[in-house]
Amino acid sequence: MELNENARIDTSQVEDRRGSGGGGGMGIPIPIGGGGRGGLVGLIIAVLVALVGGGFGLNAATNGGGSDQGDNTSLEQKCSTEDALQQLDCRNTLYVNSIQAYWTKALPEAFGDQYRPSKTVFFSQGVNTGCGQADSGVGPFYCPADDLVYIDLTFYRLLADQLGAEGEFAQPYVLAHEYGHHVQDLLGTEAQMRRQQQRDPNNANALSVKLELQADCYAGAWAKNATGTSDAQGQKIFKSITEQDIQQAIDTAEKIGDDAIQQRSGRPVNPDEFTHGTSEQRQQWFTKGYSTGDPKGCDTFGGTL
């Protein structure tokens, strides 16, 4: 993967709340067991329960709350320097730019709906959201109540060091999955799924899996088209994305499947507790989105919503 050093990094698509001191403990039960939050296994499980999509569970379990105000001054300065692409936060901002540039064109073409941009909130340790308070242990998530994506960028260190997802392309995959949830929110898919869960609570987890797999598929569709995305001045954002990069995303999907997480926690694999899909399913749906490059092919619900 090679980013274009001439592409303008649009920091207005990010809200930098790092160091704001917001948030705190969530007080929400973690559905997958393991060690306590102080132990390594417990920390991994706590994070991965909500990885790439857990914000919907956060929304369902809280009553909402206020939000902090970010200050992008430092980020704007950093991302306008010559070595901006060497900075983790600037690269992630550019990934967000690419993902939203893709959906601005793809959503009306595929579904006839206009895309409404969503900001990504960078936070550290804790954050106040429209879905309630969250801490870093919840992992990256999307909050439908305020239409924002949230991530503590130190999460990538855990993803690489503890799970072996070391490739750089794991990062835009995570963000593209979260923006897949934003697209589901815009299209009404998430709301329809919630209503279906209420009507059929016995299949609530199975419906959650379908929502998550669709977000994986949407991430794959973006990856297929990412080299065609440009900044506001028409500069390409990516110079290249290789098959090795795509394999990094597929490997990450394998490591965060429900079955892989349960095995890592030392528990028997229990399909009844799946909420995000197996490793095989997550790889399959990302690959389908990538191979077709068409989000219309991401109907994991089979037209049942």
Image: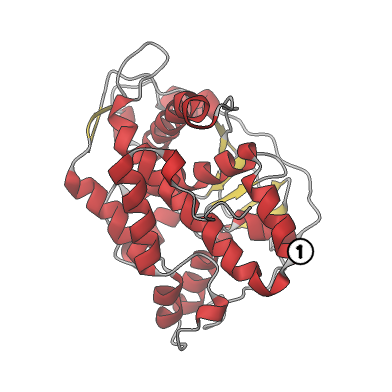
At 45% from the left edge and 34% from the top edge, which residue is drawn? 96
Tell me: 25 left or right of 266. right
Q: Up-down: is 160 above or below 97?
A: below
- Residue 62 found in image quarter: bottom right
Between 43 and 235, the one nearer to me in the picture: 235
Q: Residue furthest top?
A: 233
Instruction: Find numbered disc 1 in the image and state the secondary structure of the residue it sits on.
Output: helix
Q: Up-down: is 122 above or below 300?
A: above
At 62% from the left edge and 46% from the top edge, which residue is drawn? 189
Rendering coords of residue 241 (x, y %): 22, 37
Circle 1 residues within 10 Å: few <14, some 14–19, many ≥20: few
Q: Up-down: is 295 above or below 12?
A: below
Between 156 and 274, the one nearer to me in the picture: 274
| Amino acid identity at mark 1 | Gln
Give the residue pinned by disc 1: 198
- Residue 255 found in image quarter: bottom left
Whether residue 47 is visible here, answered yes or no, is yes
